[in-house]
Image: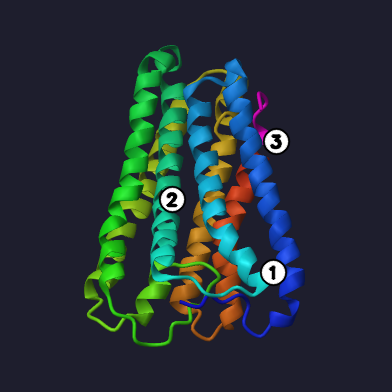
């Protein structure tokens, strides 16, 4: 396959690559620092921060998966990628997107338990349970994507081999297949409904119950203190789902929008949450 940077802006690729390099370095430093702090500081060895570490690791995974091909295209003009590497990159990218959605859900559950049962918080979310929940989220993400990647790798490709991004995405590659792709069109729709939509609804329900619990606290100061512990997580949820919604709307209704806008929205989806999450938690979480 042939990867694509910014069509029509090839002359500016070296300059654009500098911006991408700065963003990538910022993401690596921000999330790497979070992981380092959580590992080294024993006061951060709590369920909330363990889940934050999984979120940071997921963001690092997405970044490290897309960075080599993006900078390769923009910096070196290296566009070729073999089928195996492309399918593997698509597998990791899509798996980690589901993992991120799941991590945001378990972080909402963490806040729900902390506010609803503060005295039993550590007995409910023990280290063993945190490990099981974390492994469950990872397994869900990496197993659910397997069927479409297996079918993708079995298709013949006889059309144009030019992809529309500087990294491989399932929806991009599938357009080039010369076979019946009905399953690969329907399965992702079901997957988005069962993961992204369900996760977002459960997060919303969690915060409705949290808000109901907080309103039952007599002291206004204690109410504010309880809600303040949720600000960082709510901000990360908004960053994630606003970018997902924006990307979906652009792909669904932006047929007459310039193609470069579609590409920019894809980069925002993959780079903005990993860039913002460490900043949000650094500003809003006193311990960090």
Disc marking residue 197: none
The foreground one among 73 and 95 is 73
Q: Kindly state the secondary structure of the residue where label 3 is placed.
A: helix
For marks 2 and 3, give the CA distance.
Answer: 25 Å
Q: In the image, residue 44 lies at what x, y percent?
A: 58, 21
Q: Which residue is mark 3?
A: 283
N-term-proximal mark, 3 vs 1: 1
Give the percent coordinates (x, y) of residue 95: 39, 53
In terms of sequence position, does the residue under pointer 2 or pointer 3 come before the other?
A: 2
Residue 9 falls left or right of residue 113: right
Task: Calculate the distance from the C-alpha at mark 3 to the C-alpha at mark 1.
Answer: 33 Å
- Distance from label 1 to label 2 (Cα)? 26 Å
Question: In this view of the protein, can residue 220 be seen by the observer?
Answer: no
Dot 2 falls on a residue whose secondary structure is helix
Q: Residues within 10 Å of mark 3 (few under 14, many from 20)?
A: few
Find disc 1 in the rendering and name its residue.
75
Residue at the image point whose x is 62% and y is 67% from the top: 72
Magenta range: 281-288
The relative height of residue 101 versus residue 219 in the rendered view (above or below) is below
Within 10 Å of disc 2 (Cα), the crowding (few <14, some 14-19, many 20+) is many
């Amino acid at each position: 396959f042939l990867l694509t940077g910014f069509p029509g802006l090839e002359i500016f690729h070296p300059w654009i690559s500098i911006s991408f390099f700065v963003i990538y370095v910022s993401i690596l430093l921000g999330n790497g620092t979070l992981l380092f702090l959580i590992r080294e500081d024993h006061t951060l060895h709590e369920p909330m921060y363990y889940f934050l570490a999984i979120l940071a690791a997921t963001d690092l995974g997405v970044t490290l998966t897309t960075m080599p091909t993006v900078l390769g295209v923009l910096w070196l003009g290296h566009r070729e990628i073999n089928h195996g590497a492309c399918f593997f990159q698509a597998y990791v990218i899509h798996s980690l997107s589901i993992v991120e959605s799941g991590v945001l859900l378990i972080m909402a559950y963490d806040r729900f338990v902390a506010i609803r049962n503060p005295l039993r918080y550590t007995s409910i979310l023990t280290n063993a349970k945190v490990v099981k929940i974390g492994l469950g989220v990872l397994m869900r993400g990496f197993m659910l994507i397997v069927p479409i990647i297996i079918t993708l790798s079995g298709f013949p490709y006889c059309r144009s081999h030019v992809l529309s991004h500087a990294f491989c995405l399932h929806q991009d590659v599938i357009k080039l297949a010369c076979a019946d792709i009905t399953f690969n069109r329907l399965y992702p729709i079901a997957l988005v409904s069962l993961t992204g939509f369900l996760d977002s609804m459960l997060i919303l329900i969690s915060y409705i119950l949290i808000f109901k619990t907080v309103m039952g606290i007599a002291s206004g100061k204690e109410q504010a203190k309880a809600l303040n512990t949720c600000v960082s997580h709510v901000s990360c949820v908004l960053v994630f789902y606003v970018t997902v919604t924006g990307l979906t709307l652009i792909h669904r209704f932006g047929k007459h929008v310039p193609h470069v806008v579609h590409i920019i929205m894809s980069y925002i989806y993959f780079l903005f949450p990993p860039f913002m999450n460490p900043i949000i938690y650094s500003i809003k979480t006193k311990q960090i």
